[in-house]
Amino acid sequence: MNKLAPEVSAWYQDVANGNLFEVVAYDEESGSIEYQLVDGEVGEYDDVTWAQLYLAPAVAPEDWRNPYALSAEDQVYSDQTIVPENFSGALSNIEPELMDLGDDFKIL
């Protein structure tokens, strides 16, 4: 039986299977506890299941952000706006036309 209360941002280790996870959300009203494993997988426990787990408090692993790290390819164009050198195309020559809204609409 588990006597640890779920705390958001706290890390726990499931002693039975060795999983290390962080509680990311806890809704006392519905009794749902959302967790995230080190590899990024997300899951949910209810209060009854949480009480039946064999848990131990744990510290966050040093490399717990690795699943979220961007690769070198992802970082190349991260915040740069790409504008072509020759921006004059067929669509740039189109001029807007006045809109005829008919009698039902008045422009104020």
Image: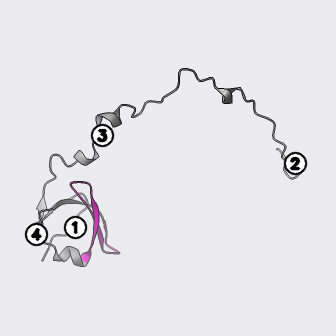
Determine crowd level at label 3: few under 14, some 14-19, many 20+ residues with C-alpha closer than 10 A.
few
Which amino acid type is shown beneath numbered disc 2? Gly
Mark 2 vs mark 3, CA separation in Å: 53 Å
Q: Which residue is mark 2?
A: 102
Residue at the location (71% across, 26% down)? Answer: 93
Where residue 79 sits, quadrant-wise, is: top left
Residue 58 position in % (x across, y down):
12, 58
Mark 4 vs mark 3, CA separation in Å: 32 Å
Query: Toward the viewer: 38 or 55?
Result: 38
Who comes first in sequence, dot 4 or dot 3?
4
Mark 3 vs mark 1, CA separation in Å: 30 Å
Who comes first in sequence, dot 4 or dot 2?
4
Foreground label between 1 and 4: 4
Query: Toward the viewer: 65 or 89?
Result: 89
Q: Which residue is mark 4?
A: 16
Secondary structure of residue under mark 4: loop
Residue at the location (67% across, 30% down)? Answer: 91
Is 88 one of the magenta-colored residues? Answer: no
Q: Which residues are magenta?
A: 26-47
Residue 27 position in % (x across, y down):
33, 69
Who comes first in sequence, dot 1 or dot 4?
1
Image vertical order of residue 108 relative to residue 52, above or below = above
Determine crowd level at label 1: few under 14, some 14-19, many 20+ residues with C-alpha closer than 10 A.
many
Q: Which residue is mark 3?
A: 70
In the drawing, does residue 102 fall left or right of residue 64? right
Which amino acid type is shown beneath numbered disc 3? Leu
Determine crowd level at label 2: few under 14, some 14-19, many 20+ residues with C-alpha closer than 10 A.
few
Mark 4 vs mark 2, CA separation in Å: 73 Å
Who comes first in sequence, dot 2 or dot 3?
3
Who comes first in sequence, dot 3 or dot 1?
1
Residue 71 position in % (x across, y down):
29, 38
